[in-house]
Amino acid sequence: MSTPAAMFGPVAVADLQSRTQYEAWLLEAVYDITNRRLAVEDVDELVYPPSGGPLSHTVFGVGAIDIGDWRPGFLRVGAPLVFVTAFKLLDMLIEWVLAENEHAQTYKFVDKIAALKGPVKFPTLVDVRPWLRERLIGLYVELEPLRGTLIHERHFKSTNGGIKVSSSKRGIVGPVVVIGPDDLQRLALVLVSLLRYLEGTWTMDEFREKRIRHALDQLSHLHACPSLGQLEPGFLSVRVYVPQGDSVECDIARVRRDVAVRRPNQDVMFALRVVSVARDGSAAIAYLVSWSELQDPSPTLKVLTADLAPFAVAPPDGLDLAQLAAEIANRGAVAP
């Protein structure tokens, strides 16, 4: 049999996109219109003033007002649709994997579940993460009978954006399984994110991987696998101002402490936006240093400006460069 890389090539990915286009769009749209977006965005911003004074902490978020607005109410009554759509997306993903493994096409869940118990290769993104493979299969096995109830039977209730549902296969009604509104969003997040990573629309990085791990931990009652112990991941963009010169120095130990204090009980990562301001206030250059580049445990980050060139980005809007230059001069060379 071919390797996973050869099996899940561009033609196969295009097939997956074709199979899942509607369901993925629907889940994204449902959470977009209710301001609970699945994509990573609206990160917090921690800004160290150029004067060296107290930092500012801005939290970006979204809220919903249910006064004459149908959108928040949609999720309260649309939970069965969200669940069935999420399972359909998972089912099509599993069917695609089995097709790439040259299994005969079948619409019988019992046959697909039996095939998953054999030597099945998943795309490399999944195969190199056994925890992800195990929980995707677990979700498929455990949710399939619940999906059957929602489609064919009446042993479920939909209240306040969640579902209470029992398996009812072969006339035997099982225990009630509670799937809350947050569970539905996490399920949508895992499946839509995985699809976008496989098709290359989004990029899997350390933060996004932890986001999936945490969501799966919160869904452990649905996939019946043990917890991965993943704390809720957090991400901040931290901004510091430095004088323009041959090198940049930053008190990175202070940044780590401040981030930890403001986001307790989270697995927090941050990117460092360095704004380098000319001493006469005539210009500014900005660099965005990723979390992966900040792993040196040294208390002070010291790097040559030339080495920051690959991380150059546009400076933030609305900067008063003359004022920034004056405040940096009074503070000294090391930021924050």
Image: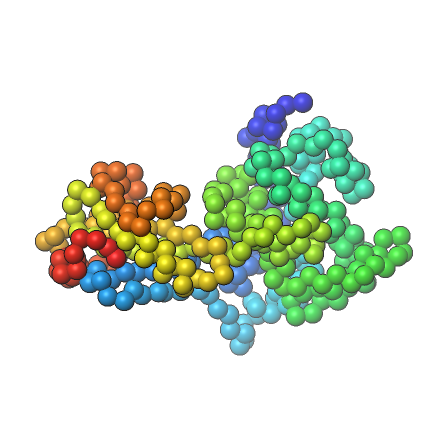
Closest to the observer, 266 or 17: 266
Q: Is residue 157 above or below residue 209?
A: below
| Residue 153 rendering spot, x and y as whole percentages | 82, 59
| Residue 319 rendering spot, x and y as whole percentages | 21, 59
- Quadrant of the rendered image containing residue 121: top right
Residue 328 vs residue 18: left or right? left
Quadrant location of the C terminus in the rendered image? bottom left
Closest to the observer, 294 or 67: 294
Quadrant location of the N terminus in the rendered image? top right
Taking the spot 61% from the left edge, 62% from the top edge, the residue there is: 182
Residue 256 vs residue 2: left or right? left
Closest to the observer, 283 or 220: 220
| Residue 186 rendering spot, x and y as whole percentages | 60, 56
- Quadrant of the rendered image containing residue 335: bottom left
Closest to the observer, 317 or 208: 208
Taking the spot 53% from the left edge, 56% from the top edge, the residue there is: 231
| Residue 258 rendering spot, x and y as whole percentages | 36, 61
Q: Is residue 236 above or below residue 90?
A: below
Taking the spot 22% from the left edge, 38% from the top edge, the residue there is: 306
Q: Is residue 5 above or below residue 209?
A: above
User: Farthest residue in the left direction?
Assistant: 280
Task: Report whether residue 153 is seen.
Answer: no
Residue 153 vs residue 229: left or right? right
Taking the spot 63% from the left edge, 63% from the top edge, the residue there is: 181
